[in-house]
């Protein structure tokens, strides 16, 4: 049975768990009204009116010409990769969710892993240059935590070597880079609207772009290559978003100002609560940019902090705070890449180091400032009672 460390940490534990990525629901009545309309119309999928409205609203919000809504970001990435005709080798960060690598491997393309910039956790453009071979056709940057990667440097490398550049913007809806909304960079960008994401459509994603040709191709590919009744002109797949998902997406979109305000308040509460703890740093969001503050990311330096990342996670889990490691241990250490690219760790020293240090804490609409104060108190008290905590963890 699970044993709490509450006595050791001298802070009351949580009766029910606090989750990372707990979905934010938006206005329930607005959602239910939309679902009733869907049922009345009996138009459940296949480019229905709510999907069209969702696409239009997303494109307007982000300031791009086209939005193609999809069933999830993984399929949207796959379609983007095919529509851009990427093949051979494509350079991606290892420090990302496994989908960024899998969407390539799944299509017989080799993901070549580049190291990160430890300040930003994003792909390091200098490392990209070293990895380019005659087989390289593209680069996929990922805006990790919604903080934009160095698009200027990445695109300069792309131009110099004739490579296509696109972005996995799964974390970055509602965020900006140099004052421009993420969504308009590179050949295209892909958002995720998974239940745990900032904008939620149960499951969902979107490819956004200013490129008309890419849009036409992607729309065809999303619907099996159909160009009209009984006329298939392309290899395609089923990437369509359903009307119910669009209903949730639209409802979620209406609530994002409130969600940003809540996420930001939570972020500031954590920053305050964890300030001046030795060896522990809550990552920054640039106040000059728009951010969704969806991730409370803490980096723990094991050489300075009283407890390392894994010990702290054990403490938090014992107190029902389900903090999570993120992107650990890096794509290159997961299968099939671990077996296929056994030397990759040698090329990824920063990814190896940072992946062992990152911990993500719960935020969103279902956590209160008092909860956050308690989470911070648990961390602070655990740090102050390192030996007792270590003994308690050993005895569990
Ligand atoms: C960086 C990144 N890329 C891609 C995805 C895949 O998104 P989806 O679950 O919508 O397919 C995720 C989801 O967590 C992600 O975090």
Image (spheres, rainbow, N blue to C red):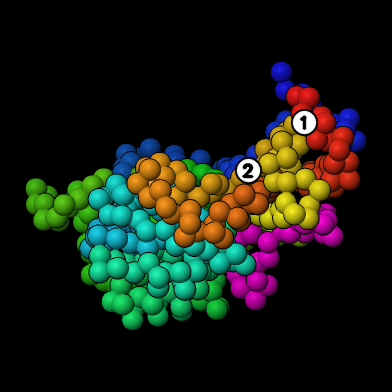
Q: Secondary structure at mark 2?
A: loop
Question: Residue 215: image x %, image y %?
Answer: 27, 65
Question: Residue 260: image x %, image y %?
Answer: 64, 59
The reply to whether dot 1 and dot 2 touch (C-beta < 8 Å) is: no
| Residue neighbourhood size for the residue with mark 1, other residues' Cα within 10 Å, grouped as few (<14), some (14–19), many (≥20) | some
Question: Residue 28: image x %, image y %?
Answer: 57, 42
Q: Residue shown at 29%/47% (left/top)?
A: 106
Q: Residue shown at 37%/67% (left/top)?
A: 131
Q: Is residue 157 visible?
A: yes
Q: Earlier in the sequence, mark 1 or mark 2?
A: 2
Q: Residue shown at 35%/75% (left/top)?
A: 158
Question: Residue 240: image x %, image y %?
Answer: 31, 48
Q: Is residue 286 left or right of residue 227?
A: right
Vertical placement of residue 394 versus 277, above or below: above
Does the magenta portion include 276?
yes
Q: Nearer the viewer, residue 294 or 133?
A: 133
Image quarter where the N terminus lies is top right
Q: Is residue 267 visible?
A: no
Res 388 → quadrant: top right
Looking at the rendered image, the disc whose residue lies closer to the viewer, 1 or 2, is: 1
Q: Nearer the viewer, residue 19 or 334?
A: 334
* Segment colored magenta: 270-296
Q: Residue shown at 56%/54% (left/top)?
A: 352
Q: Is residue 277 left or right of residue 195?
A: right
Vertical placement of residue 334 versus 354, above or below: above
The residue pinned by badge 2 equals 324
How many angstroms separate mark 1 from mark 2 (CA)? 18 Å
The residue pinned by badge 1 equals 393
């Amino acid at each position: 049975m699970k044993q709490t460390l509450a006595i050791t940490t001298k802070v009351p534990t949580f009766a029910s768990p606090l989750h990372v990525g707990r979905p934010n629901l938006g206005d329930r009545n607005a959602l239910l009204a939309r679902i009733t309309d869907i049922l009345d119309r009996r138009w459940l999928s296949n480019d229905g009116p709510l999907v069209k409205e969702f696409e239009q609203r997303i494109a307007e919000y982000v300031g791009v010409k086209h939005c193609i809504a999809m069933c999830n970001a993984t399929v949207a990435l796959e379609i983007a990769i095919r529509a851009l005709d990427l093949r051979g080798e494509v350079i991606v960060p290892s420090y990302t969710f496994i989908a960024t690598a899998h969407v390539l491997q799944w299509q017989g393309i080799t993901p070549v892993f580049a190291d990160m910039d430890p300040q930003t956790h994003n792909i390091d453009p200098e490392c990209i240059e070293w990895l380019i071979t005659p087989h390289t056709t593209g680069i996929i940057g990922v805006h990790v935590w919604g903080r934009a990667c160095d698009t200027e440097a990445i695109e300069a490398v792309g131009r110099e070597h004739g490579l296509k550049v696109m972005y996995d913007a799964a974390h970055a809806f509602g965020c900006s880079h140099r004052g421009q909304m993420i969504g308009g960079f590179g050949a295209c960008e892909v958002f995720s609207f998974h239940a745990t994401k900032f904008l939620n459509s149960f499951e969902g994603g979107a490819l956004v772009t200013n490129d008309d040709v890419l849009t036409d191709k992607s729309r065809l590919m999303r619907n099996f290559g159909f160009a009209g009744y009984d006329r298939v002109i392309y290899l395609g797949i089923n990437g369509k978003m359903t009307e119910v998902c669009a209903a949730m997406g639209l409802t979620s979109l209406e609530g994002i100002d409130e969600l940003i305000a809540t996420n930001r308040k939570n972020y500031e509460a954590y920053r305050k609560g964890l300030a001046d703890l030795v060896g522990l740093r809550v990552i920054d969001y640039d106040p000059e940019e728009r951010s969704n503050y969806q991730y409370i990311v803490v980096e723990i330096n094991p050489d300075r902090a009283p407890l390392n990342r894994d010990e702290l996670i054990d403490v938090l889990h014992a107190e029902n705070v389900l903090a999570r490691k993120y992107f650990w241990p890096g794509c290159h250490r997961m299968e099939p890449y671990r077996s296929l690219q056994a030397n990759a760790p040698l090329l990824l020293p920063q990814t190896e180091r940072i992946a062992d240090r990152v911990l993500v804490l719960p935020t969103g609409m279902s956590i209160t400032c008092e909860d956050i104060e308690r989470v911070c108190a648990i961390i602070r008290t655990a740090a102050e009672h390192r030996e007792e905590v270590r003994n308690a963890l050993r005895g569990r």
